[in-house]
Image (cartoon, rainbow, N blue to C red):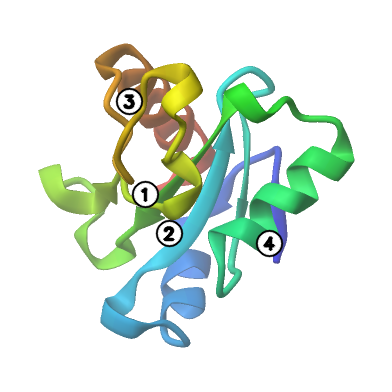
Amino acid sequence: MKLVDQQITNAELKEMSVKMFDGLVKAVVDVEEEIMVVDSELHADQEEYLLERGSKQENIWGINIYPARVGKDAWLEFDSMINLRPSQNNRSRSVENEDIRKRITIIVEKLVIK
């Protein structure tokens, strides 16, 4: 597991993706702190790490990054069990709020060197 609070290269993400099914890297993004955690088998482990570090639950969202697709539309997937949050009107594994999806995309694009 790696905290990304500065930039990370897409090459590093590609190395991480070799361990995972379908060439993805799981990530959890804190939209308030503009950081993310990558390279873990479970989003829940990354979520726990950020919560212990002081992040607020309502600000952290699980995604999948596909390093081989960087620069294309389908390089980010907004899908994780940790996103199920009826209290925030998010009733699926996806990130349903378009504004939050945009914030996540901006943060990930800022942190990943293509």
Task: Name the residue tied to disc 2.
Answer: 10
Residue at 26 percent of width and 79 percent of height = 22
Name the residue located 42 percent from the left edge and 82 percent from the top edge. 20
Describe the element under mark 2 as helix, strand or loop: helix
| Residue type at the position of mark 1 | Lys
Viewer-proximal residue among 29 and 108: 29
Depicted 109 relative to depicted 48: above or below = above
What whole-number distance in Å separates the C-alpha atoms at marks 2 and 4?
A: 22 Å
**Residue type pointed to by label 4:** Asp
Foreground tag (2 vs 4): 4
Q: Which amino acid does label 3 sit on?
A: Arg
The amino acid beneath tag 2 is: Asn
Q: How many angstroms separate mark 4 from mark 3 (CA)?
A: 21 Å
Residue that carries the numbered disc 1 in the rendered image? 114
Q: Nearer the viewer, mark 1 or mark 4?
A: 4
CB atoms at circles 3 and 1 under 8 Å apart? no
Residue lying at the far front of the rendered structure = 86
Badge 3 marks a residue whose secondary structure is helix
C-alpha distance separating marks 1 and 2: 5 Å
Earlier residue among tags 1 and 2? 2
- Residue under pointer 4: 45
